[in-house]
Amino acid sequence: MKVHQESQKFCSKVIGSVYLDPLGWTSTLAVRTQKGRLVQITTSGDRELPVATGTPLEVRGTWQGGSSAGEAAVAAAASTATASRAMGSTSSFRASSVRATAQLRPRHHRPSVTRTAARGSASSVPPPLPRISNPVVEKDISTIFIPIAAVVNPASQASTLCPGSSQPMLTAAQLARVVFAEQNQANATVGSIFGTCSFGKSQLTQGNSRVADLVRLPCTDSSAGIPWSFASCQIDDISGLADAADAVLRARGVPLEKYKHRVYLLPPAGPSGCSFGGVGYIDCGSDMSFECRSWIGAGFWGVPQVLAHELAHNLGLEHSGSQNAAGQYDQYGDGSSLMGACCSARCPSTPQAWQLGWLNLAQLDGSRLAAGKTRRVALASQDSSPDSGLRVQADWAPGVLPLFLGYRKQAGGDGGMDGSLGSKVHVYRADMGPRTASSPWMPAHTAWLTALAVGESWEDPPTGLVVSVDSAAGDSATVRICRKGGADPTCGALLAQAKASP
Ligand SMILES: [Zn+2]
């Protein structure tokens, strides 16, 4: 094995992950070298890095020239990569350190209030909380969807398919009915998911997006001198076939630059080909110096939630998880979010929808909730109004990340949410603050903490807050939030209610 020490500055691409395939991809860091090649970066341990696509990085470590594969799929990929190594290239880089050379997010956000609700009239009612919002991340989610077939001879319409492959899952016309609400009013579509969950603020429509006609690619080829194959599923493979598909579309005269996002729909490809649900760049940089890509696995062309999930990665969302029974963070474990496990119809979680600029959250902090005090807050359901949800910045507890409360019910974009989660107040914790030009957010996993039904209470030891739900019906819920301390060191009145099971 040829290994040498290397220190090099790259720009990063984070390619993040997958549904339903625990042996497949997890969040993956790849960097683009000065020569334009994507190189996968492996790190010791599985800690994920707080970087977004486009973040300049300094990576130190060693080139990996040999196969370290244990599984069949990986071994096959390694043999595919042999050709590139023979040409003097290498396939991956094991990092001993990865450091961002540009500023990352500040550790603690100071919320800035961008909009204030009208004051209440009754003197006994405290004035409504101010609301905070972010700029809409993308008003036009301009996307080209590219269905791909793997054929022995792309020049022949009658060509046989590549070994292990089969006919495209859907025709381009059928795919358009998965994508566009204009063509399929009765069902969830990619367009309806974005339009509904954003209250029309972010649109994916026939006016700004398109479905390409089928692109036929050979079983194996090379792009920019780097071999790729449908029979393998490494970054070189999915990047190479995407480059090849782009070339076919350009030759047809398709103006690719009109579309910010490119979604490649992969054909079946046998046992060592890609078996993920989807993969997408997490964020795509702000300056379009990176193409903005995602890939959809063969079994998921017809599932609009998967297509929307990957595009939402492009918009900067990470996964939404929760703690599993073993006490470990499961990054797909939030059943209330499009960014949790596949595939039922749900919008992004409350903090994520706020991050995208879709929700205007009420904001509570120590200046509006003194120690020992209890405050009542009304929450509109997230499907019914963009003025819904609450962010609690516990500025009396330094270093503790904000809490987010959202009332979710099974309606609108949340219509497919599991019944056990509907008509409840969900509580999340996330490292998310207001986004400004000087303080852009970075992708962050969110943590779902609990869902509270009427009459249940829940305690958050890091902040000393107790939350209880007084009512939850139709489009609104009412919660009381108590901050322990002073005259009420235990928030005993609220805690006396039934505790929510975790
Ligand atoms: Zn994902």
Image: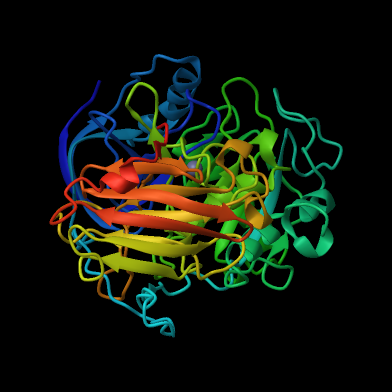
Q: Quadrant of residue 311?
A: bottom right
The answer to whether residue 379 of the structure is visible from this angle is: yes
On the image, the x and y values in percent for residue 172 come to: 80, 51
- What's the residue at 38%, 82% (across, down)? 116
On the image, the x and y values in percent for residue 3 come to: 20, 27
The answer to whether residue 355 of the structure is visible from this angle is: no
On the image, the x and y values in percent for residue 224 come to: 48, 49
Left or right: residue 49 versus residue 153 is left
- What's the residue at 47%, 40% (across, down)? 334
- What's the residue at 58%, 48% (across, down)? 423
On the image, the x and y values in percent for residue 368 come to: 25, 70
Please tell me which residue lies in front, 311 or 392: 392
Please tell me which residue lies in front, 423 or 124: 124
Vertical relation: 82 (above or below) 283: above
Q: How is the image coloured?
A: rainbow
Vertical relation: 300 (above or below) 486: above
- What's the residue at 24%, 60% (across, down)? 373
Q: Quadrant of residue 194?
A: bottom right
**Quadrant, the N terminus:** top left
Vertical relation: 97 (above or below) 491: above
